[in-house]
Amino acid sequence: MSMVAGRNFTFAEVEVRVSIVFGVWIMSVRLANIVKDFPGGRALNDVSVAFELNEVHGLIGENGAGKSTLVNVLGGSLAPSHGEIYINEIAVKLTTPRLALQHGIAHVSQEGSLVPQLTGAQNILLGAEPRSLGCVLRSRELMDQAVSLLHRWFPDVSISLGRPVSELDVADQKIIEIVRALRGDTRILILDEPTAALQSREKSQLWEIIQSLPEKGVGVVLISHFLSEIRQLSDRITVLRDGEHVQTLEAVNATETDMVDLMLRRSGGQKEIGKKTSQPIGETQVLEVRNWKAGRVDVPEFSLKAGEIVGLIGLTGAGHFGFARSLYSREGFLSGSIRICEKKVRGTIRDIQRSGVAFVPDHRMENALMGDSSVAENLSLVHSDFCSSRGILSLAAEKSEVARVVDLLNIKLSSPNQLVRELSGGNKQKVSLGKWLFGAAGRYQVMIFIEPTEGVDIGAKQEIYRQIRALAEQGVGILIASSDLLEIETVTQRVVPFVHGRPGKSIMANEFSEARFIDALTGEAA
């Protein structure tokens, strides 16, 4: 520790030149001419941008534009191929996340890093637990320290830190991650899609937390695909496109149209998203559910027509996600019947799949993908037998089918051998969908999506929505459970609201409005 003007500083703070602006200690982090090459492609090309301690700095761009790569360089997870990083104009090498933390830079990733079976307190102090004799955990002290950290940063937030984080709301989990990141001498906090999986009320809470951090001496680098969120929370906004820095603009002067134009290099980026889907193909029922009970979910009847796109909405814990998930996974299943194309289905997940049901879940890295396997390996996960004959794999057939799906979904990658964990969020989501399209022409009558564009930018949304519409036009019944009401309004033809585990009256497309949805979510709809 060192003393400057009567104040204690850590070594990391003394190591950099500190300036005072309006009485606030300011630290700037500047990335200069950053280049990052991967085998087969360049992810960042001569990117220069500066982040300040007294601001929320939004970072936007299409999936594959280089956002995640840039913050991984800043957070020490990736070493740049060329370029320099300066902290208050002193060059530093951030070769590991630990070294970045020593310099005051912490990264809360989109995918999350909590240990589900540990309590909130244990997760906050993970790796820094108070112990006696080097091995005996001091549980009371651990809880006291965790509560103190929570109250220090977010005095108005109440979380049961003694419960396993798996039992907590997603918003509380995200706050715990942020508190853990702030437990040291953090001065720059990177938040990658922090509100992607949150309901609107939870988002508002986290918005207040993000906006409060610069007032407490912590600058925020914010990645979000919600352009309204970026504009509302940010002081400045940096736009990346194809791995290059396009522009940094003042948020107060930016419109969403400006941001879309800069991101996509084309005007009217949201027009495609607003395109409505054609009506269902005939009256054929591809999915019929009767007396379905799973956990707290109780659905007397539900049906889906060929070519129909139906949305499920609800507040946190309303049951819409649980219903959608249980149809495929049988999670929490108690009783009820399900028919696919008028044929009753019994038994396991494999029976459900063989009957013609595909499932694209939320939290893709936990529930759908293998991060340390290649794109090609992930795409062939579900239909591994497609490219084999008599147990012999045809590498040529597999390569051809992988190329077809990559082209169909416009997955941006350096090669099919690139690891999935190296992809941007939107491209990971495309792989999660693509594995159901690999070798599956005409195989599925029903596709169930949960949060289909979670952590996905506007360009990738267009491509995913386009594919959903194409599947519906081929006669596939689509079921979408989503917390994004604009997404529901844009893509679906009919909406079923859930309240306290039970479905309400369907809302048809000609009745869609934000007010109508909100009334239905709160159980006030007629």
Image (cartoon, rainbow, N blue to C red):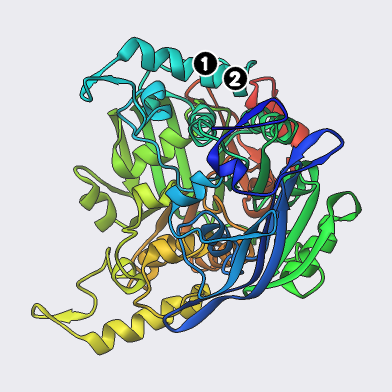
Q: In which quarter of the image is the C terminus?
A: top right
Give the farthest residue toward the left: 390
Residue drawn 52% across and 52% down? 452
Under mark 2, the amino acid is: Arg
Q: Depth check: 244 or 526 in front?
A: 244
SS state under label 1: helix
Image quadrant assignment for residue 124:
top left
Few, some or many C-alpha atoms within 10 Å of disc 2 (few <14, some 14-19, many ≥20)?
few
Q: Position of residue 297 (x, y in %)?
A: 41, 26
Q: Depth check: 501 or 429 in front?
A: 429
Residue drawn 84% across and 63% down? 258
- Marks 2/1 in contact by CB < 8 Å: the verdict is yes
Q: Position of residue 117 (x, y in %)?
A: 30, 28
Q: Depth check: 20 or 461 in front?
A: 20
Q: How many circles with numbers are drawn on the protein?
A: 2
Under mark 1, the amino acid is: Ser
Few, some or many C-alpha atoms within 10 Å of disc 1 (few <14, some 14-19, many ≥20)?
few
Marker disc for residue 148 = 1
Give the farthest residue toward the right: 253
Q: Position of residue 369 (x, y in %)?
A: 35, 57
Residue drawn 63% across and 16% down? 155
Q: Is residue 249 left or right of residue 42?
A: right
SS state under label 2: helix
Q: Is residue 524 left or right of residue 178?
A: right
Marker disc for residue 152 = 2
Q: Can residue 300 be seen in this view?
A: yes
Q: Is residue 489 left or right of residue 281?
A: right
Give the answer, above or below, for where 432 lies relative to 150.
below
